[in-house]
Image (spheres, rainbow, N blue to C red):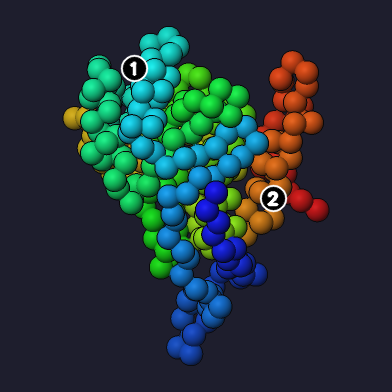
Amino acid sequence: MESVDLVQNTTVATTTTTINQYGQEIGVGLPDWKPAQSPQRIVLDGQYCRLEPLIADQHAVELYEAFQAGTNPDKTWTYMANGPFNTYESYYDIVKTVFEVTKDPMHFAVIDKQTNKAVGTIAFIRIDPKNGSIEVGSVVFSALLKRTRQSSEAVFLLMKYAFDQLGYRRFEWKCDSLNELSRKAADRYGFTFEGTFRQAIVYKGRNRDTNWYSILDSEYNARIRAAFVQWLDPNNFGADGQQVCRLSDLTKAQLL
């Protein structure tokens, strides 16, 4: 696996404002801030899954088959800008001509290490190294991936890469305000809800109000990283596979 130099770039501040020479309130200074690095198309390896740069000829067949699993598989695409795909050829074509080649969004295939097969996709989007902001988006998890350790770890792998290796200060999550599962996922992963952008997007011929969420580097370092590490520990799961501690409880806990 290609390595990336670790960046120590935490922007913790005890206050959020200061006063300038004119008596005006302004944002706190960041004298040590350096722009973050751009993400690269590398393999990100975890305990239960790994993320591989999405390649049509390598992943499309397995992904298309995975997306056909479960009841009413087309519902997976309800809140996505693309899909559903009625034929393998139509899915392969968009992966080959769009998902595989764009740098923003930068798409990854989620590989289940138990089966060594691709079972979903995830991406970095809205990549802004200058301001240290990056979003996880285009999250398309098949029925084989939803509600598994692998799905949560996939998000954590991108989060850890962004904060620990690339030096970002803000990690974003956005979704259609009507997407209940995505709202719950953001809460479970420890994102803070920031508000709703009304009439933000028109997609599939309909309106979308967009909910915005974020995790800051200070929050990640204080509790979120440790929460994911503890939750993903094999000892957190019984012989029946059931979790001992819930991730939502861990991400909300304030470390003493």
Residue 107 image offset from top left, x and y in percent: 38, 42
Q: Residues within 10 Å of mark 1 (few under 14, many from 20)?
A: some
Q: What residue does disc 1 label?
A: 74
Residue lying farthest top?
71
Q: Nearer the viewer, residue 210 or 55?
A: 55
Which is closer to the viewer, label 1 or label 2?
Answer: 1
Q: Residue, x 59% and y 37% (percent of image)?
A: 153
Could you tell me the amino acid type at mark 1? Asp
Q: Residue, x 42% and y 64% (percent of image)?
A: 129
Q: Residues within 10 Å of mark 2 (few under 14, many from 20)?
A: some
Q: Is residue 75 above or below residue 184?
A: above
Q: Residue, x 40% and y 25% (percent of image)?
A: 63
Q: What residue does disc 2 label?
A: 223
Residue 111 image offset from top left, x and y in percent: 51, 31
Residue 55 appears in view: yes
Which mark is drawn over residue 194? Answer: none
Residue 75 appears in view: no
Q: Nearer the viewer, residue 67 or 29?
A: 67
Please tell me which of labels 1 and 2 falls first in the chain.
1
Asked which secondary structure carries label 1, the reply is helix
